[in-house]
Image: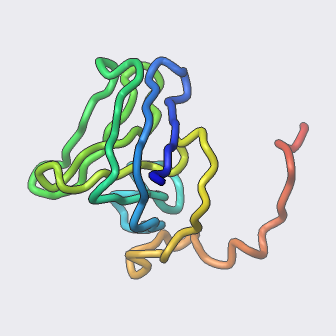
Amino acid sequence: MSELHYGSCLCGKTTFEVIGEFQHFYLCHCSRCRKDTGTAHAANLFSSTAELRWLSGKNNVKIFTLSETRHKKSFCVECGSALPNIQMDGKLLVVPAGCLDSRLSVIPDAHVCMASKGDWDAGLEQVTRLDELPLG
């Protein structure tokens, strides 16, 4: 039985489903992914067999490709949320894990591009953890 995942952007205008399994789940620390996400790493799921179906807002999806690279990002033009995209001439579906609304039954396979991680991205397991935003 094929897996079924649902996802959306932050504003909710763009929704999608992914039918099929993800083969890989990587946390990429390269400088492009850090700029892409504004965080320590991108968290992307990869599949060469799953199918992406836009349920709403497909016209709100913009695809940016960094010139002279294979780096690609899809996002909602309304709220800027990262969204799935098809790469490698239709052979690879890339889904940002954070845009999924359904639960994932997998954990990341690896941290990748660690040689170029941010210099502040070390020892984060020692940083204080809070369940909510601090007040004040």
The outermost residue toward the right is 135
**Residue at the image position 58 percent from the left and 68 percent from the top:** 107
Measured as percent of width and height from the top left, residue 74 is found at: 32, 38
Measured as percent of width and height from the top left, residue 83 is found at: 40, 38
**Residue at the image position 47 percent from the left and 24 percent from the top:** 79
How many numbered marks, from 0 up? 0
**Residue at the image position 86 percent from the left and 54 percent from the top:** 130
Q: Nearer the viewer, residue 47 or 135?
A: 47
Q: Quadrant of residue 11?
A: top right
* Horizontal relation, residue 101 to residue 16: left or right: right
Q: Nearer the viewer, residue 60 or 48?
A: 48
Q: How is the image coloured?
A: rainbow
**Residue at the image position 48 percent from the left and 54 percent from the top:** 1
Q: Nearer the viewer, residue 14 or 117?
A: 14
Measured as percent of width and height from the top left, residue 115 is found at: 39, 81
Q: Nearer the viewer, residue 110 or 70?
A: 110
Q: Taking 108 as reference, is 105 above or below it?
A: above
Q: Taking 123 as reference, is 133 above or below it?
A: above
In what quadrant of the picture does the C terminus appear? top right
The outermost residue toward the front is 1
Measured as percent of width and height from the top left, residue 110 is found at: 48, 77
